Amino acid sequence: MQTNPHLLNRQIQQVEEIPNSKLTFSVLQWNTLARCYTSSKHFPLLPREAIDFEVREKLLSQEIKSYNADVICLEEVDKTDLQFFKSLYSENEYSFSYAKKPHSKDGICILIKRPFELMEEEMIEHTNENKEKQNLVSQVVVAKQKKGDLEICLIVASCHLKAANFPQVRLNQAKQIIEVIEKKKQKYMELGYKKENMIVLVCGDFNDCHESESTQEFLQHKDLNLKSAFEDVEYTLFQKYGNREFTIKGVFDYVLHSDNLILTKKIGPPETQISEDGLLSLEFPSDHLSLFCELSLPETGETKKIESGFKMCSIF
């Protein structure tokens, strides 16, 4: 009997079957919890082995490689551990793009499996209303794949929106990411790519719930027409912070995709009992769940409406 390769004993669920598709590919989204945020000050009640990166990296590698995704978006990638993440796959297997926050030790990265060919990458240094730079970055990459006479253009945005009580900052970040995506779409349509063969993905830790202005800025944008791949999850973050004086548990992480794609598979919830102490433990190396799904671009161009089932986040 084959053992489940995913941590927390999670199963990949079949959602739809698309008999005729132009392209089928998979996506992994994960906030991996940077080394710089795992001091004993952050998690004073956890055993040292649970927060040491040298211990956690084995679990991180197992979880990431268990999916073998075509597109991988990771947040909280510490610059100190950049070589570890680069070493997960060879340059012949994946392109690797990294954007570090100017005044922090961590950043975000996007890995795209070949035969997708990376055409360009852009780091967004977010600014406030006065055009002053903030210590916040996002990343947008563009890749293509040619299948016979068909050329598909893939635009991937990865982001880590501002945490805590800064909803306006998060909203501004969302607007700036959308602006860059729109410019990329226009550019590649002018280069001859057909609109129906253009794919947009927005992945990341939004640090906010589905009903928030920043998340809705993406989902309600009429030109992007984005849908969420995970609409029935109970939580993606489960954290007991500090001396456990408060708990954060809710949906904060997202895989959004253009509505010309059909969701065919996705990872299910943990079947392992999660401790009341949260996700980060000796068995799991992050306080965020990994999100994995498979998407298909149908031959007919038909799309299906996905009903929303998001739950509000809860802070105790």
Image (cartoon, grey):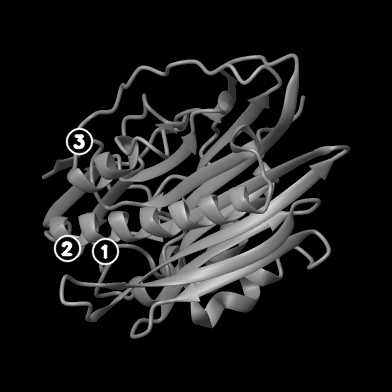
How far is mark 2 from mark 3, CA to CA?
29 Å
Assign the C terminus to one quadrant of the image.
top left
How far is mark 3 from mark 1, CA to CA?
33 Å
Residue located beneath label 2 in the image: 243
Check if mark 2's residue and mark 1's residue have beta carbons within 8 Å: yes
Under circle 3, the secondary element is: loop
At x 48% / y 55%, what residue is drawn?
A: 157
- Residue placed farthest to the bottom in the image? 103
Q: Nearer the viewer, residue 230 or 46?
A: 230
Residue located beneath label 3 in the image: 211
Q: Nearer the viewer, residue 56 or 140?
A: 140
At x 51% / y 59%, what residue is drawn?
A: 74
The amino acid at mark 3 is Glu
Q: Nearer the viewer, mark 2 or mark 3?
A: 3
Residue located beneath label 1 in the image: 45
- Residue placed farthest to the right in the image? 148
Q: Nearer the viewer, mark 3 or mark 1?
A: 3
Check if mark 3's residue and mark 1's residue have beta carbons within 8 Å: no
Q: Nearer the viewer, residue 259 or 161?
A: 259
Residue 55 lies, with reference to residue 253, above or below; the image says below
Mark 2 or mark 1, earlier in chain: 1
Residue 132 lies, with reference to residue 160, above or below; the image says below
| Residue 73 badge | none
Drawn side of residue 144 relative to residue 121, left or right: right
Image coordinates for residue 61, horizontal then vertical, percent: 63, 58
Under circle 1, the secondary element is: loop
